[in-house]
Amino acid sequence: MNLSNGVSGQNRNDAISSREDTKRLMKPSTPTRKLQPPKPENAITIAVSSRVLFNMEREQQIYERQGMEEYLKYQLEHESEPFSPGPAFSFVKALEAVNSRLRELYPQSEELFDVVLVTNNHAYVGLRLIHTINHHHLLIERFCMTGGNSPIGYLKAYHTNLYLSADSAKVREALQEGIAAATMFTQEKMKEVSDIQLRVAFDGDAVLFSDESERIFKAHGLDKFFEHEKAHENKPLDHGPLKGFLEVLGKLQRKFFHKGLRMDCPIRTYLVTARSAASSGTRALKTLRSWGLEIDEALFLAGAPKGPMLEKIRPHIFFDDQMFHVEGAAELGTVACHVPYGIAQRLADK
């Protein structure tokens, strides 16, 4: 009798356990409650405009051709339709993948990427943007909608480490405020990129470094440039507008290195420069070392086109100060951003 009751009880326990296992398996893999964003002072804040995170080309054309009222009317009429991904979308998804790995290794740490949607859109458009973010399962909780006013004044309040926008005037304004920024473009062709490793590629002069050497080249030609770099190879270059962004990437990389994951790090950085290795590469590498910064891969192209090399790297984002490099990379499917900084911009304006 007692044995029979014991078997019956065991069967009930097994059935309950089986149902619990089934419930666990049927639960969605993503949490039903979104994780709280980290405090801004602890986070690496990436501010992206709605026009680079999503494809809003049609809406922008309506605004430019028909004005604000027709633009708002169109947005309200299409409020339930999510926007399709824009050029910054894969970059933002890669940031989230890095965050996921960091949370596994450092559950209590708030040293995470925090994406802020920064737009001068009217708040009426907010519902469509929220709907789109939920539709694409993006973890974006912070919005800054300025209703036609420039959002640049808010970037410092968000402790912004990088600002991406389709508006070159706003990008220049941000750079003048000392904020790393770049102009992003909607392009027809975008190569498929890694969904588990964030890859960021930088040009050197006027991006990571100052435009000091670029000025010598523009004013006196290539031979004088080589002479200058050889004479100053032990003098570090001054910093450029995106040095700070490379620094925060390096800070997060070291968190993975400390766990023995150097070869399995979900962040990889590249220097892709027109400099020649033997003639002017030494100063670039010594400058990075003097800053205490590592770069995973350095490609010295000696003036060769960057597009084919970037096509092999497949970065989520590439930064360059010269539009012909940006355009060449974009034609081959790399999401390339323009950093409007330094002597090359003034010569282009002229």
Image (spheres, rainbow, N blue to C red):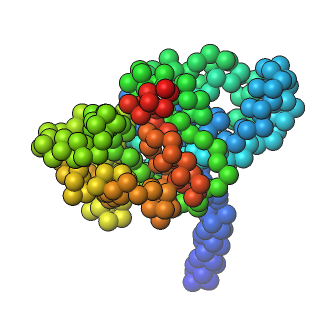
288 with respect to 19 (left or right): left
Name the residue at 24% across, 46% down: 223
Of residues 72 and 40, the one drawn nearer to the viewer in this rendering: 72
Q: Is residue 239 left or right of residue 113?
A: left
Q: Residue at x 36, y 64 (%)?
A: 264
Q: Quadrant of residue 122?
A: top right
- x, y (%) of residue 125? 74, 28
Q: Can residue 313 be seen here?
A: no
Residue 238, by quadrant, is top left
Q: Position of residue 181 (x, y in %)?
A: 46, 33
Residue drawn at (34%, 45%) of the image: 204
Q: Is residue 68 above or below residue 281?
A: above
Residues 154 and 40: in front is: 154
Give residue 184's position: percent from left, percent from top.
Answer: 56, 39
- Is residue 65 among the parts visible in the rendering? yes
Which quarter shows the N terminus? bottom right
Q: In the depicted view, which residue is nearer to us: 313 or 79?
A: 313
Identify whether 85 is placed above or below 15. Answer: above
Work out whether 212 lies above or below 223: above
Residue at left offset 81%, top offset 34%: 79
Image side of residue 273 versus residue 228, left or right: right
**Residue 166 x, y percent position in the rendering:** 60, 34
Q: Number of marks in the image?
A: 0
